[in-house]
Image: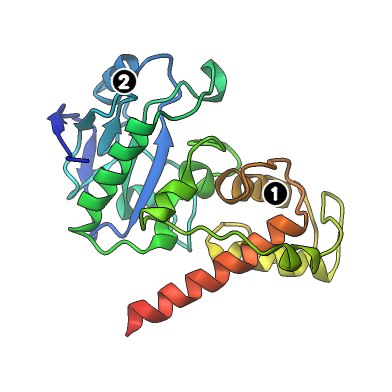
Amino acid sequence: MALDLIEAPSPNFDTRRAPPDAIVLHYTGMETGEAALARLRDTDARVSAHYMVEEDGRVFRLVPEARRAWHAGRGTWQGETDLNAASIGIEIVNPGHEFGYREFPAVQVEAVIALLDDIRGRWTIPDARIIAHSDLAPDRKQDPGERFPWKTLAQASHGLWFEPAPERIAALTGLLQHGDQGLGVVVLRSGLHRLGYGLAPGGDYDAETETTVRAFQRHWRPSRVDGTADGETRARLVGLLQLSQVETVTGML
């Protein structure tokens, strides 16, 4: 798909401290794309993104990639606490959970993929750093949510995805859930932390752990978003950690 950018400059940006090495995907969470575009360009709103992708595939460029847009807010990924400074932000038009969350049209997803092709042709951005807004801020964000086709993006070589074999799932018996303690929780929390979440290692399956598991599921196990770590959730986490490690080693060669 050819990328046809529409210039729609936003005044809401400032200076970067380093080249971007991450991409954060959002949904707009407003009733229309027109309303979202207006807000992203409103000086009083003090919010922006580098790009916005409409449901019909139109791509608006709001902030130059060399500048720091204001899209991520408070959060953490792989130890980075200023994701605005480290990332390129893409807003994807969808009313979101508040206004009638719906599937993302194929033409819109194709436009996102074309945009990612374009961006990654200029910057070094690992697959493990193409993330959801909800990944960096599990306690306050849900976007772009469980309906977003992360698998399709990964098949187009953007982002991590892993589907475990049935025997791998079967090997991880039982559930880990709120209130649990012990070694299984230690391993789970450590794995989520290693992948990039701000959750610190520990042995209690507390409210923060449950929230983080729910964010993980929205991205990597979308058929079950309940904050309970069943065998498939844990098997997917293990597989993603292995892929992330391979990517890290390959990048060093």
Indicate the position of residue 2 as horizontal and vertical percent values. 17, 40
Instruction: Tell which circle, 2 or 1, labels the residue nearer the N-terminal end.
Output: 2
Mark 1 sits on what residue? 208
Looking at the picture, tell me which residue is in the foreground, 244 or 10.
244
Query: Count the marks: how many?
Result: 2
Determine the secondary structure under disc 1: helix
Q: 210 above or below 20?
A: above
Mark 2 sits on what residue? 39
Identify residue type, mark 2.
Answer: Arg
Side (left or right) of 119 relative to 95: left
User: Label 2: how many residues lie within 10 Å, few (<14), some (14-19) or many (20+)?
Assistant: some
For the point 79% across and 55% down, which residue is it? 205
For the point 64% across and 63% down, which residue is it? 164
The colour mode here is rainbow
Side (left or right) of 173 relative to 121: right
User: Is residue 202 visible to us here?
Assistant: no
Q: Residue furthest bottom?
A: 253
Looking at the picture, tell me which residue is in the foreground, 250 or 44.
250
Identify residue type, mark 1.
Answer: Glu
Determine the secondary structure under disc 2: helix
User: Is residue 237 visible to us here?
Assistant: yes
Residue 91 lies in what quarter of the image?
Answer: top left
Indicate the position of residue 143 as horizontal and vertical percent values. 50, 36
Q: Residue furthest front?
A: 166
